[in-house]
Amino acid sequence: MKTSFILSASESIRDAILDHESELESLDRAIGDGDHYINMKRGANAIVEIRAELESLTPDAALNKIGMKLLSTIGGASGPLLASFFMSMGKILKENADDSAPSYAAAFVAGVEAIQQRGKAGLGEKTMLDVLIPVAQQFSTLATSNTNIKDICTALMHTAEQGMLSTKALIATKGRAAGLGERAIGHIDPGAKSCQLMIEAVCKQLLLIQN
Amino acid sequence: MKKFINKIDDVLVESLSGFAGAHHDLVKLSLDPNFLTRQQKAVKKVAIISGGGSGHEPLHAGYIGYGMLDAACPGHVFTSPTPDQMLAAAEEVHADKGILFIVKNYAGDVMNFEMAAEMLPFESATVLTSDDCAVINSTYTTGRRGVAGTVIVEKCVGSLAETGATLQACKALGDKVNGLTASMGIALTSCTVPAAGRPTFDIEDNEIEMGVGIHGEPGRKREVMREADAIVQQVVSAILDALKPSPNSEALLLINGFGATPLMELYIIYNTAAKLFNHHGINITRSLVGNYTTALDMAGASITLCLLDDEIKQHWDSPVHTAALRWGV
């Protein structure tokens, strides 16, 4: 993975967030406080704006810088959680710099673990982790079994979608929706939705450069 | 949306600049990262820093000054501030006795302050406020939210810090006051976040949201609008259930407006609540009525009861000089 890929993926993520304004907003209005889209947009734009600064960095340093930037830009719960993800991913890549799918999977797994620790949350709590944990597990399995990138991407996009949809039936035990009790049932978690969008954006970007 | 704003993106900085200008004798504003400190830096005391999303004014910047906070970090509207703000504020107000963060128990605030504390080069401790007894199911591990009771914690801890007390003592008092405080809110209307441009939640003319949070996040139950006494009765019961005060307790009663409810109605709430608490053997010897922890333009109010002992009474009564609370000076 090159830094240029991180840059183009960041732009795809920004576009995906902007394209889903009304959906993200209405999901958060239903079970949160309606600011998730605004915060995600602010973060995504901030990363695209520091493009010139990121360009000169190695991939691990660029991911760390993205984490720091998100930490000081997004706020809320999403800020520290996404920051922890990118900073941990950068740290693992720095320690293990070989350009292989298993390394990226290990970095992704470490990022998801960092989110779990920071948010003190796990699977089934109606959060972004309902997307990230299954995706991390599958990424790890596929990357270590010599699956080609195209198949990995297709599988991860599907798993992310399933994870996102699974939050609909759940009661929230973490985050602002936790106060809602059973009223949260029937609504997709906005954080799960934005994570699914980000994973889809990166996978589509990867598929694009494979072709 | 009908609001006194210019550009959506300028709401926060223009409001902060206006606040700092209006209270230039008390506070100083730093931008990028955004934080406010006392005009005159205090020495040899624990530095008390609070912060949270904006839209709850006068919380927290309105409580900067002698006897309360040393600094406040305002986030975007209803969004936690970020660690760089807390680090910059701590650097500025640190006075050799450590930093105490007072943080409302919301996931975002907790995580951002936690990351700041990890990066901080000074000794620090955190008091998490969790006075909102509307969140009933304790298996929801996010736990009770920090709402208007936070003002009482900030007042008492701020008072103790002025005496040169240690970081541990300040934290202990904060935790104690928090444990003796319970609040619950009722929304009559939604609020409108400027950047969203429309109400955060839909509510019918004849409906109220019992147990609403200070961001308009839903609470216990959607109910039908009734007369004030019936609503207050229900909230008072919930508070009594949460605190289980012994008869002959002494207490502070705070009636807090959410931003769009007239003082006239807040006093109607006070009138009923004080009578009901009295009826349960609770002697209301201190009171505060007004807009102290708001939710933008939400119509509604919260009721907070804080059980008093001699120590808490002493620190509540002690002199304070801030934009929003001032007595004894």
Image (cartoon, rainbow, N blue to C red):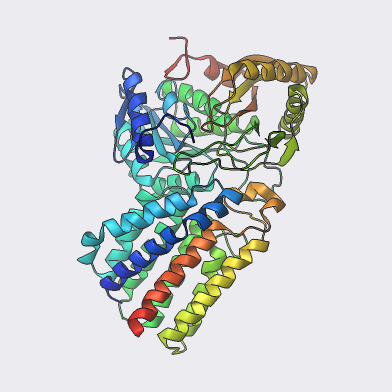
Residue at the farthest right position: B279
Along the viewing direction, whichever of B179 and A22 lies nearer the viewer: A22
Could you tell me if residue A31 is visible in this image? no
The number of callouts visible is 0
Is B111 located above or below residue A53 in the figure? above
Q: Quadrant of residue B264?
A: top right
Q: Is residue B313 left or right of residue B58?
A: right
The spot of residue A133 in percent (x, y) is: 54, 69
Image point (44%, 90%), residue name? A146
The spot of residue B168 in percent (x, y) is: 48, 34
The spot of residue A200 in percent (x, y) is: 46, 71
Is B38 located above or below residue A100 in the figure? above
Image quarter in which the C terminus of chain A is found = bottom left
Image point (45%, 70%), residue name? A199
Q: Quadrant of residue A203?
A: bottom left
Q: Is residue A108 left or right of residue B208?
A: left
The spot of residue A158 in percent (x, y) is: 54, 76
Is B11 located above or below residue A196 in the figure? above
Residue at the farthest bottom position: A146
Residue at the farthest front position: B2
Could you tell me if residue B76 is visible in this image? yes
Along the viewing direction, whichever of B307 and A6 lies nearer the viewer: A6
Q: Is residue A123 left or right of residue B108?
A: right
Image point (37%, 57%), residue name? A44
Image quarter in which the N terminus of chain A is found = bottom left
